[in-house]
């Protein structure tokens, strides 16, 4: 039993320090943990993309590396039926999971393209990738997310 508590504490510490997405994406999560992990990843993406259109060089690469890593893991943070009062995910996600996952794949591919463009100094290619990523956010939220009140 002490090992179980130690393991749980370790996972909690990883989550609190931002490593939870990487640590738990391949393991089964409880509903609350899945919701918290995906919300953390999406907020991290939002911060990375907030001024991404003004970034260049290593900062641009870093922003899109964060997005690519999160987009790769996010579908795994939506175990079937993982909706709580803290979640705005719609049940249609699990009816159309292939379409849902494809949105993340499109964003992950765009991030990889944007990383290559940023490394090459290709501002137009980088900005094009940012636009595609923004479109994936819109596509997903429009179809698979409940509207928030207020």
Image (tube, rainbow, N blue to C red):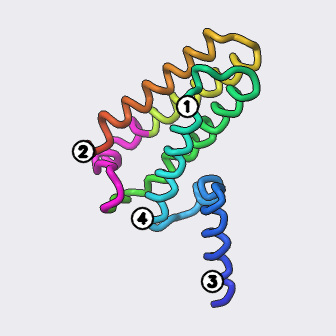
Calculate the distance from the C-alpha at mark 2 to the C-alpha at mark 4.
25 Å
Q: Nearer the viewer, residue 59 or 115?
A: 59
Calculate the distance from the C-alpha at mark 1 to the C-alpha at mark 3.
36 Å
The N terminus - image quarter = bottom right
Evaluate if marks 3 and 4 touch, with contact meaning CB atoms under 8 Å apart: no
Residue holding disc 3:
5
Residue holding disc 2:
150
- Identified at 55% across, 38% down, the residue is 47
- Identified at 57% across, 20% down, the residue is 53
Residue holding disc 4:
31
Numbered range of the magenta stretch? 85-100
Calculate the distance from the C-alpha at mark 3 to the C-alpha at mark 4.
19 Å
Q: Earlier in the sequence, mark 2 or mark 4?
A: 4
Residue holding disc 1:
49
Name the secondary structure under disc 2. loop
- Measuring from the top left, give residue 31's x and y in whole percent: 42, 64
Instruction: Write down the quadrant of residue 63 in the picture.
Output: top right
Q: Earlier in the sequence, mark 3 or mark 2?
A: 3
- Measuring from the top left, give residue 68's x and y in whole percent: 61, 35
Name the secondary structure under disc 4. helix
Vertically, is 122 above or below 98? above
Q: Earlier in the sequence, mark 3 or mark 4?
A: 3
Evaluate if marks 2 and 4 touch, with contact meaning CB atoms under 8 Å apart: no
Calculate the distance from the C-alpha at mark 3 to the C-alpha at mark 2.
40 Å
Counting labels gives 4
- Identified at 60% across, 69% down, the residue is 12
Indicate left or right for 83 with 109 as reference. left
Query: Is residue 97 part of the magenta span, yes or no?
Result: yes
Q: Nearer the viewer, residue 132 or 86?
A: 86
- Identified at 64% across, 76% down, the residue is 9
Crowd band around label 2 with a 10 angstrom C-alpha radius: few (<14), some (14–19), many (20+) = few
Vertically, is 143 above or below 31? above
């Amino acid at each position: 039993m002490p090992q179980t508590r130690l393991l749980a504490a370790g996972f909690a510490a990883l989550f609190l320090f931002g490593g939870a997405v990487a640590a738990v994406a391949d393991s089964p999560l409880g509903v609350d943990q899945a919701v918290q992990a995906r919300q953390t990843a999406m907020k991290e993406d939002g911060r990375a993309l907030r001024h991404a259109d003004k970034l260049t060089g290593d900062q641009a690469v870093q922003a899109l590396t964060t997005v690519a890593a999160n987009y790769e893991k996010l579908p795994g943070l939506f175990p079937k039926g993982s909706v709580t009062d803290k979640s705005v995910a719609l049940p249609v996600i699990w009816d159309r999971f292939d379409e849902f996952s494809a949105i993340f794949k499109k964003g992950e591919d765009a991030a990889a393209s944007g990383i290559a463009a940023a490394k090459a100094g290709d501002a137009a290619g980088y900005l094009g990738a940012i636009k595609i990523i923004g479109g994936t956010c819109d596509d997903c939220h429009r179809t698979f997310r409940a509207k928030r009140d207020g």
